[in-house]
Every structure is written in structure tokens, then in C-alpha cells.
Amino acid sequence: MTVSVAEQATQRRTEAPPRRRKRAPKSTLLTVVMLLCLVYFLLPIFWLVVSSTKSNADLFTSFGLWFSHFSLIQNLHDVFTFQNGVFGHWILNSLFYAITSGFGASALATAAGYAFAKYKFPGGTAMFAIVLGAVMIPMTALAIPTYLLFAGAGLTNTPWAVILPSLVSPFGVYLMRVYAAEAVPDSLIEAARVDGASEMRIFFQIVSRLLVPGSITVLLFTLVATWNNYFLPLIMLNSPELFPLPVGLAQWQAASAAGSGSQALFSTVITGSLVSVLPLMIAFLFLQRYWQSGLGAGAVKA
């Protein structure tokens, strides 16, 4: 039985071993730079963990980047029992401020960004230019005018004085505007309108699902910014029961660094700082899953 030349060539191609993929070239310089960046970012965290296991005396008599005497349990006890356990109130305050501001700012930025990206209305370009200009203004420059505004409204020394300014995120609006312009096809919106869906239904049932990755990004940025916010709560709040963690720990640090007769709270402040970092780590690890899954879902639906 004869075999044609074409069949023989096809058979040889089928039996030929698969070619090995070429490995991407490695850059020694880039690897060294990345390792240096990794050390730069992880070294302060490592120092914080090590210092949290030391007493006040060990902080000044032992090597700072390695363990000596394990006093972490005692330090944690001191943190949560000092001043009648006010540290627990500070944690709850920070959680309330960060979660409320994060979800509120994410929702507002998502709606505003979608409106700027998909709707044409008079003054839209000028309003978006104002948003871009607001991105360049540091929040500390607006702290005093914000305080005067809230003092006139009688809202100082209340949780609203921290939450309401945090709901405004010009960078979040800009980010969601750029993301919505690419993630939401115009044909999908037109198809929904042809089917009789209202604009509110289109946004909440169709568009919002495509914008999940961008919304999660704004949520993370706002969570971190509100959790670490120090200057705004410092000028807005007077009652220690309303303080977030940064302001409360700063007060303890000021008491440690004061003159004679002050309490030695260095290990307490450091351990409290370690505890204050943990919720942000948990938030990033938890939300990263929705971030990645949202990217894939948005790409498929788009």
C-alpha cells in the first residue's frame, strides 16, 4: 500500500517531538534591584515584629534586628489593658471609619466614574477637569477649611467629621472613569436599553458587575487612606473614645517621649503598631481574591 508524499510529511510532523519553549532571558541586575526593593519594604515590618517581642529595657540593650527575650504576650496584655482598655475602642473606631468610608467612597466613585465615561451632559468636561485638579491637592491642605466648615455645622468631635470627608475620592472617580470607559461596551448598554431596561437597572444589574475590579481597587485605596489618616481626626476629634488608632498611638508615643515622670510605653506603642497593621494585611489578602476573580469575570462578560 503506497503512501503519498503529503501523508508522509504529515506523519513526520505528527511524530516530531514538541519544541521546547525558549526561556525568558534573566537579568541579574533586575533581580538584584528587586531583592533590594523587597528588603527595603520588608525590613521595617521585620523590625516591628522583632521589637514587639521585647520589653522596654530590651529595646535599648539588645540588637534591634533579632530576638532576645520573648515578651510579646506581656506586651499584648499591656496594650489591651492600658487606660482601661481604650485600645480596643480605638480598633473599633478605626474599623468603623475605614469600612464605612471605604464602601461609601467606592460606591460614589463607581457611580460618578460611570456617569463621566458613558453619559454626555452639559458641563461634564469642565466637571471632570475639576476632579482632575482636586487629585493634585493634598488632603492636609484641605484639613483646616474642612474643620471650619464642620465646626460651623456643629459636626466636630463626631464620627461624621471623619467619615464624610473620606467619602470624597477624586482619584477614585478618575480611576473609575478610565476603567468604565474600557470595561463597559457601549453596545451592551444599547442592547439593554432596547430591551426596555431603565438606566438604574442597567447600572445596578449589568454595569456594576463589570466594574467590580475597579470598585475593589478604590475600596482598598480608601481603606488604607482612612485607616492611616492622622491629621484629620487629630483636628476634628477631642474625645479619646472617638480616636482612631493613629491618633491614639501618637498620644501614647508623646507620653513616652515626654520629660521626667512620664511612663515608659515604647514597647506598648510598638506592639500596638503591630496590631494596627494586621487588619490591613487581612483586608488585602481577603479582597485580593475578589480583585482577581472580578478581572476575569469582567473580561469574559465584556
Image (cartoon, rainbow, N blue to C red):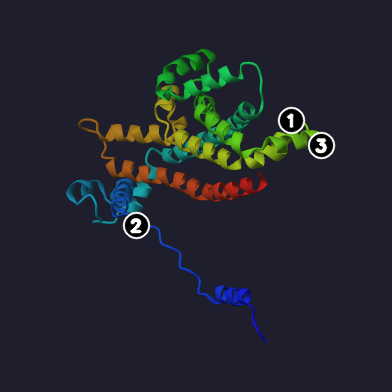
Which tag is nearer the camera, tag 2 or tag 1? 2
Q: CA distance from mark 1 to mark 3?
A: 12 Å
Can I make out residue 249 in this image? yes
The residue closer to the viewer here, 4 or 127, is 4
**Secondary-structure class at tag 2:** loop
Residue beneath disc 1: 199
Q: Mark 3 or mark 2, which has the lower sequence index?
A: 2
Q: Quadrant of the C terminus?
A: top right
Q: Position of residue 291 (x, y in %)?
A: 55, 46
Q: Mark 2 or mark 1, which has the lower sequence index?
A: 2
**Secondary-structure class at tag 3:** loop
Residue 26 — which label? 2
Which tag is nearer the camera, tag 1 or tag 3? 3
Hey, which residue is sitting farthest top in the picture?
152
Density class for disc 3 (Cα within 10 Å; few <14, some 14-19, many ≥20) is few
Q: Which amino acid type is shown beneath numbered disc 1?
A: Glu
Q: Quadrant of the N terminus?
A: bottom right
Q: Locate residue 100 relative to residue 27 in the image: left or right.
A: right
Density class for disc 1 (Cα within 10 Å; few <14, some 14-19, many ≥20) is few
What residue is at 50 percent from the left and 74 percent from the top? Answer: 17
Q: Compared to 173, does 14 lie above or below? A: below
